[in-house]
Structure formats: C-alpha cells, structure tokens
Amino acid sequence: MRRWVVTFGGAGLLPGMPGTWGSAAACAVLLVIHLAIQPDAWAWAAILAGGVAVCSVLTLWLWPWARAHFGKADPGPFVLDEAAGICLTLLAQPAGGWHMAWTIAAALVAFRVFDVLKPPPVRQLEKLPRGWGVLADDLMAGVYANVVCQLVGRVV
C-alpha cells in the first residue's frame, strides 16, 4: 500500500521521467475531480489546499520508508511531492469548465520547468534534511509556476 501511495498509484514507476509522470497523474486526477463535481472557486481552492496539505504530510510521513525501500534520499519513483507542487501551482488560478483543462496543462508545463531547472532557491531547498528537502523544492517550484500561470492566465 505504501508503495502505491508514494508512487501516486504507480505513476512514479513508469520509465524515463517519474517526476513528470507523477505530475501528470496528479493533473489528471485534478481534472477528473473538477469536471465531475464542477466546484465553485472557493470549493476548488479548498480541494487544492487540501491536496497540498495531504500530499505534504504524506511526503514527510512516508519519506523514511521510501528512502529505505528505494535506497536513495530522493528516490525517483517517490512522487507525492510533485503532487503537492501541482496542487500549489493550480491554487487560485483563473479558470473554469473546459478551460480548466488548458489551465491544468499550462500548470503541468510550468511546474515541470521550474522543478527541473531548479532556479534559486529551489535547488537550495532541496538540501534541507530528511523529507523536508524532498518536499520544499517542489513547493517552491509550485510557487514559481503559480506566479507564471497567474500572469499568463490574466493576459491570455
């Protein structure tokens, strides 16, 4: 069960780019939720904030197990931190209905760019001890991606 949770339903086990697969899986889940229940802006914000909180707590709680299981301090298949970052990227973004699909796609691209390039202080946060470094760099990448998407979303 822990392996399934930390890999976000197995997405982190897909070959090549586990962070991208985990981020894409989180985006797919969020799009399905949005289309299924069509929440108003406040409910959507609560869902996303809850996603950040739950994925963050699970990241910190399950990181020791994942480190031992996968044999690395920041194991590639461990993608709960990416899910937290995606939720943070989408928080308070202007969109609704099918426009949300485009917003989520843009959030995925922006988040992955900042997560891969790791501009300051993203890379520095990665060096925090234990699970904090695994989580904090993705949350900061989510903040950067959120700001970019906020600006682009208001211009386009």
Image (tube, grey):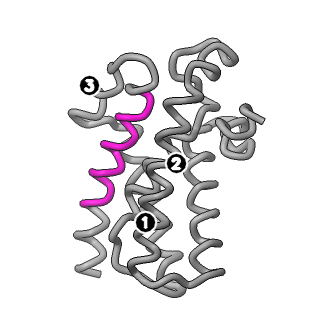
Gap between marks 1 and 2, in whole Å? 23 Å
Crowding at mark 2 (Cα within 10 Å: few <14, some 14-19, many 20+): some
Instruction: Please check the rendered image and state whether residue 149 is part of the magenta-colored stretch, yes or no.
Output: no
Q: Earlier in the sequence, mark 1 or mark 3?
A: 1
| Residue displayed at 42% across by 59% down | 49
The residue that disc 1 covers is 106
Q: Which residue is mark 3?
A: 124
Can you give x and y, in whole percent of width and height, for residue 52 in the image?
A: 45, 51
Amino acid type, label 2 = Val
Q: Quadrant of the N terminus?
A: top right
Instruction: Categorize mark 1 by other alpha carbons within 10 Å: few (<14), some (14-19), many (20+).
Output: many
Q: Do the residues under discs 2 and 3 have CB atoms within 8 angstroms?
A: no
Which residue position holds label 2? Answer: 54
Could you tell me what secondary structure mostly forms the magenta stretch? helix
Q: Which mark is first along the chain, 2 or 1? A: 2
Q: Amino acid at mark 3?
A: Gln
Give the residues in magenta.
134-147
The image quarter in which residue 33 lies? bottom right
Residue name at image x 41 percent, y 38 percent: 116
Q: Secondary structure at mark 1?
A: helix
Q: CA distance from mark 2 to mark 3?
A: 24 Å
Q: Residue at x 29, y 28 (%)?
A: 125
Residue 5, horizontal then vertical, whole percent: 69, 40
Is residue 126 positioned above or below 115 on the image? above
Q: Nearer the viewer, residue 17 or 84?
A: 84
**Residue neighbourhood size for the residue with mark 3, other residues' Cα within 10 Å, grouped as few (<14), some (14–19), many (≥20):** few
Please tell me which residue is depicted at 74% across the width and 42% down the height of the picture: 10
Left or right side of 149 for 47: right
Residue 6: image quadrant is top right
Residue type at mark 1 is Ala
